[in-house]
Image: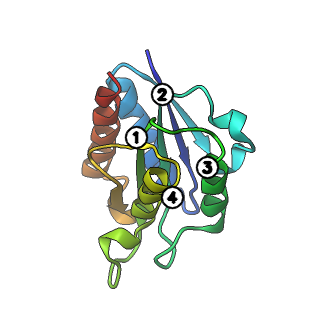
Amino acid sequence: MTKVLIAYFSSTGKTETMAQYIAEGVRFSGHEAVVRKMLEIKDVKGLSGYDGYIFGSPTFMVDLPKPVKTFLLLTQNAKLEGKISGAFGSYRHDVSYKHDAYAPAIIFNVLQKENKMKPFELGPFNLKEDSVETREGMKACQDYGRVFGEKLL
């Protein structure tokens, strides 16, 4: 059995809920999922020992929250090259956002370009906050985690 780290930053609880649902999906595929807040991971040792990584953040004004930026800097020293990676997050409004301006897309690009991680084929996963706790939102998150887990085989 392989192990996946799902690390997230959440201010309203929606991204945290997504992390838990994604972890369920990873477990559905027969793998272990460890869910942690980004702020709990203080050094590169907290990032070692995993076969896959999924990082989550809400989108704040077409950018990443500062704790997420700090966390991503930490990941660059963790030697995660070649590991499969995914990204997810919630957002409130999308009036002027482009797909590549959402936090998950920014994270996904950093993981590929800076960390040289293997991109998960489903790409970054966005979900509007008001749909996170619906049946459809829960299923979408679980499906993301399940497919991620299936790719670890």
- Which one is in front, 33 or 135? 33
In what element is the residue under mark 3? loop
In what element is the residue under mark 2? loop
The C terminus is located in which quarter? top left
Task: Please report the residue visible at 67 percent of the width from the left and 59 percent of the height from the top.
Answer: 70
Pointer 1 with pointer 3, Cβ within 8 A: no
Q: Which residue is mark 4?
A: 57
Distance from the alpha carbon under mark 2 to that under mark 1: 19 Å
Distance from the alpha carbon under mark 3 to that under mark 4: 17 Å
Measured along the vertical axis of the image, is residue 131 above or below residue 25? below
Q: Is residue 33 left or right of residue 144?
A: right
Examine the image and state in which quarter residue 66 appears: bottom right
Check disc 3 and give the amino acid type.
Gln
Distance from the alpha carbon under mark 1 to that under mark 3: 26 Å
Check disc 2 and give the amino acid type.
Asp
Picture colour scheme: rainbow
Pointer 2 with pointer 1, Cβ within 8 A: no
